Amino acid sequence: GNGTIPSFVAAKDKLLHGLLAAGFDDQSCLSRYHSVFFRKESPHIPSPYLLKKLRKYESLHEKCGPNGQFYKQSTEQLRSGHGSRSAECKYVVWISYSGLGNRMLSLSSAFLYALLANRVLLVDKGSDMNDLFCEPFPANSWILPPDFPIKEFTNFDIKTPTSYANMLRSKAITNHIDGASTHSLPAYTYLHLSHDYDVFDKLFFCEDDQRVLDNIPWLLLRSNNYFVPSLFLVPTYKEELRKLFPEKDTAFHHLGRYLFHPTNSVWGLISRYYNSYLAKADERVGIQVRVFDEGGTGPFQYVLDQILACTVKEKLLPDLSPGQEAAVLSPNARSIAVLMTSLDSGYYEKIRNMFWERPTSSGEIISIYQPSYEGHQQTEKRTHNMKALAEMYLLSMTDTLVTSAWSTFGYVAQGLGGLQPWILLKPENKTVPDPPCRRAMSIEPCFHAPPFYDCKTKQGIDTGALVPHVRHCEDVSWGLKVV
Ligand code: GDP
């Protein structure tokens, strides 16, 4: 009937093997329980330990989240400027910052950190987090209330005196274990984990510093990076991460599917597009084109050549036959829907014309679609980010995915979809790289700015060579990813 879930929904595993909590209001966030109909079932099943941890987190969030006595007490302490060693509720406040793909990666990293450090995650809603995502936790909000006492956090940066790094420098905090007096610890500190962070900020990834941070009730965190791979290298969290993710490269896959439920407006964009253009095809191929070329606006011939070189070489799309004549169409010819995303319409137009002007040698029917061409990044615009989310999500619903090197937009799509993409490697000097693309080692995003520091010996070290499951990325040679 009206407003209820059709019975066939119940037959599907709408809770994703227990990843999602039951009991949310269905209508207020349709994507939460309905996205399962738009995807193939994930081969990755969340571990019972992760499910237990999430349920435990949900009750902590209910207790400590906004609109409760603990939150009130804790913010009063923050106003008074003093921490309390025995704080029952400790927090991580995620500061909204950067492009949407970057935001989703840093937010999921902050959530994993909250799980590991037994903290409650609160989210600065920024200009549009409310418009984009539903509340992920039952029973209490994740949005930081507007009366939060520290107003200036939106301007926090590497120079902020209350950052952990700067407090270490000014000796307002000490990280020597024997000297660490918890009396003198502040009520909050700012964790600067953005790409421009320095050696002191990077101490966040050291065991001793985690021990100090554990005694500070409020951590305000700003990052534009997926810093999970380096959490896998902190001794404090190794064992817990092993239990949470026996399949190591599924952290973003599960946490992303747990956290990110598009609001009904965004879900409208997603589901209408999917039903109109993608649902009926025998196969769906996603091609994400993100061009980081400073010299001009494009479209660039070398980018088009690279896309075609990759899709033909890897047989992701069929060859065109040499002639132009109509072939006899088999009544049960396979159809392939190609979903392209790009800020530019040029690549899409060229590829669509190619497949119009000549038949495929396989006889397959190719349709090329691109939902939007926004021209340039407009992070401050609400509808722009809604379309960006819709497109990342649509890419995640494809069967085969091609992404662009360096792009967090592509990482989100691959991670949510559980897809090991072919990565279009970064072109140098406007020429097609050889090979044009490479299959990703895993479905995890790449951490673009990892620390290269050995906390024990206090020396530089190659953090991509310490354990077999944390390696350098395919697309960013100094980056780290979990494989
Ligand atoms: P990254 O810069 O590729 O790592 O990804 P981000 O998502 O962090 O920032 C890029 C931003 O540019 C996106 O959030 C969008 O606002 C915009 N953008 C880039 N590529 C596309 C695209 O293919 N489609 C749409 N709609 N927006 C895009």
Image: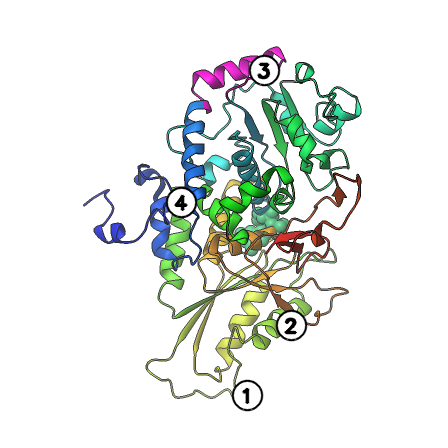
- Quarter of image, res 26: top left
Q: Which residue is mark 1?
A: 322
Q: Which residue is mark 4?
A: 19
Residue 476, magenta (yes or no): no
Q: In the structure shown, which secondary structural element does the residue marked by tag 2 occupy?
A: helix
The image shows residue 17 at horizontal and vertical percentages of 36, 49
* Towards the viewer: 5 or 227: 227
Residue drawn at (46%, 23%) of the image: 64
Q: Is residue 362 among the parts visible in the rendering?
A: yes
Residue 84, magenta (yes or no): yes
Label 3 Cα crowd, 10 Å radius (few <14 / some 14-19 / many 20+): some
Query: Which quadrant would the N terminus be assigned to in this image?
Result: top left
Q: In the structure shown, which secondary structural element does the residue marked by tag 1 occupy?
A: loop
Label 4 Cα crowd, 10 Å radius (few <14 / some 14-19 / many 20+): many
Q: Which residues are magenta?
A: 64-88
**Picture disc at residue 280:** none
**Picture disc at residue 84:** 3
Residue drawn at (43%, 79%) of the image: 364
The image shows residue 320 at horizontal and vertical percentages of 53, 82
